[in-house]
Amino acid sequence: MNLRPSHISLLAGAVVLIVAVWLLMRQGDTPPTPAAGNPAVSSKSTKKLAGPLATNPDDTAPPPSSAGPGQPHITLAQISPWLERSGRSPEALVAAWELTQDPALEAEMAEKHAGNPLVCLMLLQNPDGTINQAWVDRLRLADPNHPLPDCLAVAQAAQAGDIGAAKAALAQALTKKDPLNLREKERIAAIREATAAMSVSPAEAAMAPSTVFKRNQATQNIIQGAMALAKQAKTIAASGDASGAEEAAGAAITLTAFLGTNANETLMQRLGKGAVIARASEILPPETELGNSGRTIAQALQEDEKNKEITRQFISLSLETAPPADSNAFWDQWLIGGEIGAMQWAIKRFGGRETGK
């Protein structure tokens, strides 16, 4: 189907995420099999994993997210009046930079607000998608309770095959008081405020918030690191070390737990978690409890299948005639219930009937 610019903000994110998470799920050599089929793993009674998954399932910690690449063409000249009225605050500079990608704004943020946690979060990803360790270190100083630096350290060590360093970094992450918050909701709100103050078309205003999701490398790194831990658990199990395998698989699930909870999770987070849990289920029994959440691995995998079905239904919608007002309503729903909630809203809004009627 042919998509108009005003529809990209609704659809491009889901398509990009499905491909990205599919690639993550394909990292394993074989499809996951239940732990019961692995002779190296003991058939212990119900286990329980510690960490962020132990939080109340109704917690609403703002998560990272992961939607698409659609972006309006907004210039620095267009956004400068709003930027001045906003006092060129770190938050306003970030919104202006995300919309324009003007290097002068990046330089201003780095020079004037290097100790601001939001600025550190923005600048820790290089233009080529790699992580800038200098800005990770600055984030650690600017916000000592933010777990992202430690989570990235876990992922880096896991991908390098250093289980000991990964476990040590994970232990540090678990001591942090704050959730792993990349401030997407705050950034979306600022971008919508900026575009509302400018002379841009309704289609451009509806598409603008999707620029937030171009900077999702941290989320991808964490998912890839967790997948590496889960794959290493299988290798450890093959060596006959059942306890070590279970510990590595549990660490993989615990790492993904930092990415958000329930309705506030993004599509990338939910499907990424599902892929990691599926891989870890080769080692851990299906009745393993995920912290104090009351959920087991088996239940989490069932939820993952539901999320995949929501995704399938969402991308099958005919949105060619969806007006910008509906795209704006989609972002309203995103701010309330996260990405999955917004997708469910779109399914109810457009499913089973011609879009725009």
Image (cartoon, grey):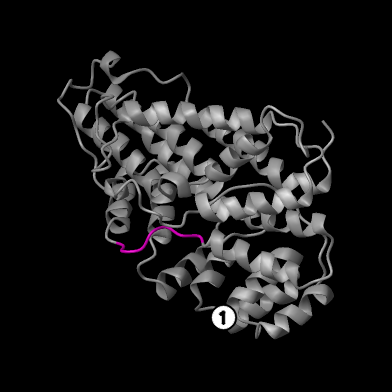
Using the rendered view, name the quadrant where residue 230 is placed: top left
Using the rendered view, name the quadrant where residue 252 is placed: top left
Rendered location of residue 275, percent (x, y): 46, 31
Rendered location of residue 357, percent (x, y): 78, 37
In front: 184, or 125? 184
Q: Residue at x 76, y 55 (%)?
A: 71
Image: magenta residue range: 176-182
In front: 269, or 247? 269
Report the magenta stretch's main SS: loop
Rendered location of residue 82, percent (x, y): 73, 79
Q: Residue at x 48, y 28 (%)?
A: 306
In front: 15, or 145? 15
The stretch drawn in magenta includes residue 162? no
For mark 1, what is the residue? 113
Badge 1: how crowded within 10 Å, few (<14), some, or many (20+)?
Answer: some
Q: Residue at x 51, y 76 (%)?
A: 116
Whether residue 329 is visible = yes
